Image (spheres, grey):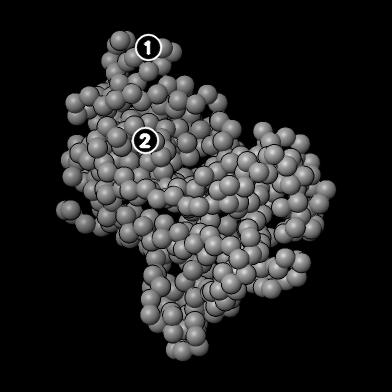
């Protein structure tokens, strides 16, 4: 056991959540130590779709210049449904440009590029420390954690301990925060390949058997996500890459000659979607964020965004605790859960509903899906509420009046003034800065 070191905030996990939090704290001159067990940037696919709320956070962190050089903006997501002969049954557009905000766009960015930007920016500050590769082993007492690095165990004394190391979070387990988990009967294959020039917007294409998501990246590439059934992966591998190509080309013929440039199954990642939630996010001086606290179905592309938004809100709360000289008043950390809990729960539910409408195969489920998507996209009231929620800029839950609106009763549009009432403001995001006591 090597000698003990000290830090103010210890973060297990050097992904986008951990690095966003570390950057926020380092900018406020709070000493922060991050441990990351992976060498380098890693090669496992993670989220790449940045929502408007996340883009605004990067502006506030003053890294938009670096981010904007690496993104491919997406204002529209086109949802299509085709039959077995590839005849079009539906084509509707979900449009970010309708949102009454300055950053009314989403954007695609390679995940590792985003991590590099966050790491490079955090490394500019003397209060930021990264130990990599290193792993969190256990928590001892209130303020000590044991890590392992280069085969040796060492102790770090920290005022606040953060778990940002994903689904299997050892920090979460160390304080016995209960986890509820659910799985799905489908999986995803994801891979990046050269994009046809005609692919400009994001596209979600479904038929009676499967679903394909296509999201253009910078540099003429496209990130693809193919839904498959639980038993299909082994069958497809036995049949060879031609079966994989055919699944893509069947849904979008323009991909012929592009998806075929994938030459090895090693380039294709299998994703097993899991949804989990925890009963609470804080336990004493321990806080869990991102996938350590909540894993959502990837259909709506919310997982990475929720993690970054968690990190930024928590970073402001901890910074404020130091500003008001109450860094060890751990009861204040519960404010984080007050702000994030309901938002995360509802976005997780929305992602789950999106997953369910693609979960069943067959022509009848497809017809029902077409009807549901059409009512959501073509009804301006429902469209704008959905876009506001997934963009992360506000929270407005669907209710009975929306059901009536879907069938032509009541108001079918929302004014900008009404939307603004449900959008988050600084007081919603950072209530501690507007209240003297919790």
> In the drawing, does residue 390 fall left or right of residue 345?
right
Residue found 41% across the figure and 40% down from its top: 167
**What's the residue at 41%, 64% (across, down)?**
394
The CA distance from mark 1 to mark 2 is 21 Å
In the rendered structure, the answer to whether residue 135 lies left or right of residue 175 reads right
Quick check: 361 left or right of 425? right
Query: For mark 2, what is the residue?
Result: 169
Q: Secondary structure at mark 1?
A: strand
Q: Is residue 221 left or right of residue 50?
A: right
Q: Position of residue 195 (x, y in %)?
A: 76, 50
Give the residue pinned by disc 1. 152
Q: Does residue 436 sit above or below 403 in this rendering?
A: above
Measuring from the top left, give residue 261's x and y in whole percent.
79, 41
Query: As rendered, which of 289 and 86 lies closer to the eye?
Result: 86
Which of disc 2 and disc 1 is earlier in sequence?
A: 1
Q: In the picture, residue 172 is in which quadrant?
A: top left
């Amino acid at each position: 056991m090597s000698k003990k070191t000290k830090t103010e905030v210890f973060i297990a996990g050097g992904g986008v959540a951990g690095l966003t939090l570390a950057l926020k704290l380092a900018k406020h001159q709070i000493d922060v130590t991050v441990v990351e067990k992976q060498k380098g940037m890693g090669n496992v696919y993670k989220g790449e779709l940045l929502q408007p709320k996340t883009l605004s956070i990067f502006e506030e962190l003053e890294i938009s210049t670096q981010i904007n050089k690496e993104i491919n903006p997406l204002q529209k997501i086109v949802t299509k449904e085709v039959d077995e002969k590839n005849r079009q049954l539906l084509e509707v557009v979900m449009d970010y440009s309708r949102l009454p905000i300055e950053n009314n766009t989403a954007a695609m960015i390679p995940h590792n590029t985003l991590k590099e930007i966050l790491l490079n920016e955090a490394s500019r500050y003397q209060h930021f420390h990264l130990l990599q590769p290193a792993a969190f082993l256990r928590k001892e007492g209130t303020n000590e954690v044991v890590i392992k690095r280069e085969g040796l165990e060492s102790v770090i004394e920290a005022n606040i301990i953060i778990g940002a190391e994903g689904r299997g979070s050892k920090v979460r387990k160390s304080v016995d925060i209960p986890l509820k988990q659910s799985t799905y009967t489908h999986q995803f294959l994801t891979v990046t390949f050269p994009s046809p020039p005609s692919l400009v917007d994001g596209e979600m294409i479904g038929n009676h058997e499967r679903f394909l998501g296509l999201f253009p990246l910078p540099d003429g590439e496209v990130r693809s996500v193919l839904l498959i059934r639980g038993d299909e992966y082994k069958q497809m591998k036995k049949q060879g890459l031609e079966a994989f190509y055919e699944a893509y080309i069947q849904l979008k013929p323009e991909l012929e000659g592009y998806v075929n440039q994938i030459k090895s199954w090693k380039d294709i990642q299998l994703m097993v979607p899991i949804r989990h939630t925890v009963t609470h996010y804080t336990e004493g001086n321990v806080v869990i964020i991102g996938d350590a606290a909540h894993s959502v179905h990837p259909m709506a592309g919310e997982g990475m965004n929720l993690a970054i938004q968690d990190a930024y809100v928590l970073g402001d709360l901890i910074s404020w605790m130091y500003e008001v000289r109450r860094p060890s008043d751990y009861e204040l950390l519960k404010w984080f859960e007050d702000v994030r809990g309901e938002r995360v729960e509802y976005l997780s539910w929305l992602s789950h509903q999106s997953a369910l409408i693609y979960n069943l195969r067959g022509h009848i489920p497809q017809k029902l899906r077409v009807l549901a998507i059409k009512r959501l996209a073509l009804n301006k009231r429902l469209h704008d509420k959905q876009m506001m929620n997934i963009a992360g800029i506000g929270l407005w839950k669907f209710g009975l009046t929306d059901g009536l609106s879907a069938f032509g009763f009541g108001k079918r549009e929302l004014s900008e003034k009404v939307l603004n009432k449900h959008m988050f403001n600084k007081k919603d995001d950072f209530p501690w800065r507007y209240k003297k006591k919790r």
